[in-house]
Image (cartoon, rainbow, N blue to C red):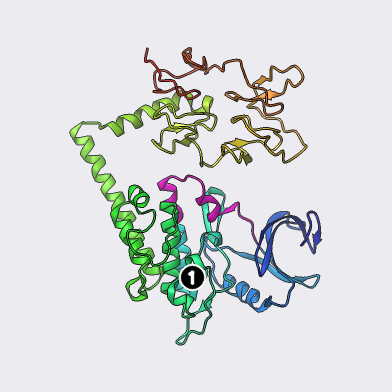
Amino acid sequence: MLRARQKLGKYRIVARIAKGPLAEVYSAVDTIQKQKVALKIPTRDDSTDEDEFLHEVRVATKLRHPNILSVLNASYIDDRFVIAMELGEQSLADRIERRMSTTRAIDLAGQAIAALAHAHEHKIIHCDIKPENFILFPNNQLKLADFGFAKVSLRTLKASGSGTIDYIAPEQAMGRPKFQSDVFSLGLVLYRLFSGKLPEWPFEWPLLGYAQLTSRVRPEFVEMLKKAIQLDPMKRYPNAVAMQADFERLKSHARQQKKTRGRGTAKSGRANGSTWRRMQWREFQRHYRQTLETRHQCRRCEGPVAESMQDCPWCGTDNPARGCESHMPSTCPRCERGVKKDWDYCAWCYGPGFVQETTRRYPDKRYTAHCANKRCHGPLMPFMRYCPWCRTKVKRPWKLLGSKKKCTSCDWGIADEFWNYCAWCREPVRKS
């Protein structure tokens, strides 16, 4: 195992980010080009076959696509075979564990299908499609990685049953991978993306999580997944290219239906409840988005909410922004709200201390008040419930800039002309 700050050629190791039976992956800095990279290094034991890693590099080099992870360099350094790749933020496996809007999930699904379709167009069978092999980059760009098990399709294909058991197709498990095998694996990945559940053998419909799936996507999309996860390879899409064509057709059809419904509403002059609600949300955002930092959507009603809110002001859901992508550099492991790396405690929930990640202190223009504890007097951001430096409970009520109204229960500022519930204590708001 390499250590932090250890030099390996022109690379300086930052940390190990993954460990598998065949290789370890490290985050590192290219000291010459001054960029962050991921280094994949085979383990040094008798079971490691470097030919597989050479094969991975050669296959990935052939595939140039915005949704396929690029190999930046590959060479022998200090008797180690080192593959330098782009460094992402997290894997799709990590992102699936947190709440995701349907719109975002559909966007990621389209990118995943596009990546595999490009590989299939070049006669490459990936053979190990799983969430861990899709890497997320800034602006929600998804890239397919790890072509170590990939096979080139020939008239007679000789291949092992390599792959990950949870997502492997039956025929691939018996050593006969096809393009349809990748389609099957991708179908399971997308099913989990939308339902939150991974189906298991014998894959009989309705599968585990079917209710969650049908509540989020249209029936036509469910049928597409059904076709991808058929046990008989001949009943699936012949390859990801055909699957992508079907996916794009469904998206185009959905956009056309949405446009038609929009015209019908305008002609009739009637605004339904959903339209009125969204008009209310837009007006609220115009007044309070900057003050409250309502960048996220409630995980239930999809109304605008902030990480600092304990409850949704529209539907009353507890911790409405849970699972959303934070604009803070780190996340509390308990409440999943954003935190700064120099805080000693989470400022939003009360419990065991937040693990401080650095001894350096960072200024922040969002600090507008100070802790009442005379021994601490640390800076506070609006609507913090606890001091992140000494964990003292904030007793002075926070005011809401732009509103003079206060909650009758907690005395914190509220937007009574918009909210149905107090975002800080869930007390029903009495309209003035």
Magenta extent: 85-110
Residue 246 point in image, percent of width and height: 33, 63
Q: On the rendered structure, is 269 left or right of 206? A: left
Q: Nearer the viewer, residue 263 or 235?
A: 235
Binning the other alpha carbons within 10 Å of mark 1 as few (below 14), some (14 to 19) or many (20 upward) gives many
The amino acid type found where label 1 is placed reads Ala
Report which quarter residue 221 is drawn in. Answer: bottom left
Q: Is residue 123 visible?
A: no
Q: Quadrant of residue 245?
A: bottom left
Residue 13 is left or right of residue 430, and the answer is: right
Depth check: give the residue in front, 238 or 188. Answer: 188
When the figure is inspected, residue 119 is found, relative to residue 193, above or below; the finding is below
Q: What residue sits 36% from the left and 59% below the top? A: 207
Q: Which residue sits at x=30%, y=60%?
A: 223
x%, y% of residue 341? Answer: 69, 38
SS class, disc 1: helix
Q: Position of residue 378 (x, y in %)?
A: 72, 23
What residue is pinned by disc 1? 119
Give the quadrant of the C terminus: top left
Asked if residue 391 is among those painted magenta in the image, a careful observer would answer no
